[in-house]
Image (cartoon, rainbow, N blue to C red):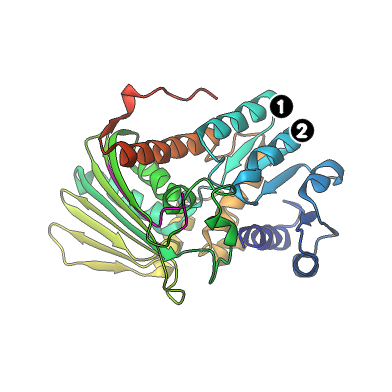
Amino acid sequence: MIGATHGLMLADIAQKCPGTVTLETIAEPIAAQRQLFVEHLGVRHGYADARELIERAEIDAVFVCTPTHTHLELVRAATARGLHVFCEKPLGMNLAEACEIARLVAAAGVQAQVGLVLRYSAVYDVMREFARDAAAGRPMAWVMRDDQCLPIRGLHGTPWRADPARTAGGTLIEHGIHDLDLVQWMFGPVRRLRASVRNLAGHPGIEDYAAVELELESGLHAQIVNVWHDMVQRPSNRRLEIVCERRFIGSEHDMAGPIEIQTADEAAIVLAEAETLARFAARHPEIPAALHGSLGASYLAQDLAFVQALRCGQPPSPGLADGIAAQRLAELAYRSAREDRTITLAEEPDPAP
């Protein structure tokens, strides 16, 4: 699913901004799906094996959109050939693998970006702007409820997520890592955290509930609740509320809006989807006007940023250090849950890629 998403975004960029990027080829082991990708994305060739694509295709960069246990192997192959890499989250099966990926990229002298897509959400970009505005006062609370159907079926249909040999864990590391990154992107590093997890679906090592309380260096307190439930008809949902001294900002939508805003002196207003997207586009003049109609899909802005960074010779963002920081928070949250204690980050070894 995520590979198809990136393929569609890159194809859209290629069509609307000629000369920016060419989507050359894809790798997909299932023949029928591979043929569909070739036809719908307009690529010249499809490989059955990702290693073969990396070794043979005439490309500059590769998107790694495979199950988590394959990321390190594929990044190693790509960097050995001198290819730039976009790697989906989480970077690796554990923090050590994530750091090894960063080491490989640095040694090869190539660029890399990690798929922490919420940084390119129009909703969260605009919410961040309103929350960091001096008129809002100091941020007081950041509360995220993030739920979706256990992704082994339904929309996502990825049964490997119930296999602990192929996935880094459950809802926190495989999905909530976006939320862990988002709070730090909005308000800075975490000072300490405490977490609890549960497993109701019965897949060993794959938690379907995680709750994390974080205290940031700024003093802000944040709560994240991640749930993988069994309601296949319920769409993937995020509800974020930010309470500042003189402003409330909230949204049920993690890409295009609307956003609810309440200030100390005025009635609540709703920033509609169109207004949110227009504000996001105005804040990002690097996005060509031809793509403004597609900004409701955060993946497009994310993939465009990777392409633009490579074309300009600049480090992409979020980089591997951001992916490592988010994975570290997830691992510390799991340890907190196991040991039933609060963990202070300054007392833990800082990973060195």
Q: What is the C-alpha distance between the residues marked 2 and 1?
A: 6 Å
Q: Where on the picture, by quarter, is residue 152?
A: bottom right
Assess whether residue 286 is covered by the magenta stretch: no
Q: Position of residue 348 (x, y in %)?
A: 36, 24
Residue positioned 67% across, 40% down in the render = 85
- Which quadrant does the N terminus fall into? bottom right
Question: Considering depth in this image, is 229 or 175 the residue closer to the camera?
Answer: 229
Precedes in sequence: disc 2 or disc 1: 2
Circles 2, 1 touching at the beta carbon (< 8 Å): yes
- Which quadrant does the C terminus fall into? top right
Q: Which mark is residue 194?
A: none
Q: Which residue is mark 1?
A: 108
Whether residue 289 is visible here, answered yes or no, is: no
Q: Magenta residues?
A: 203-213
User: Measured along the vertical axis of the image, is residue 325 above or below residue 164?
Assistant: above
Assess whether residue 206 is covered by the magenta stretch: yes
Q: Where on the picture, by quarter, is residue 47?
A: bottom right
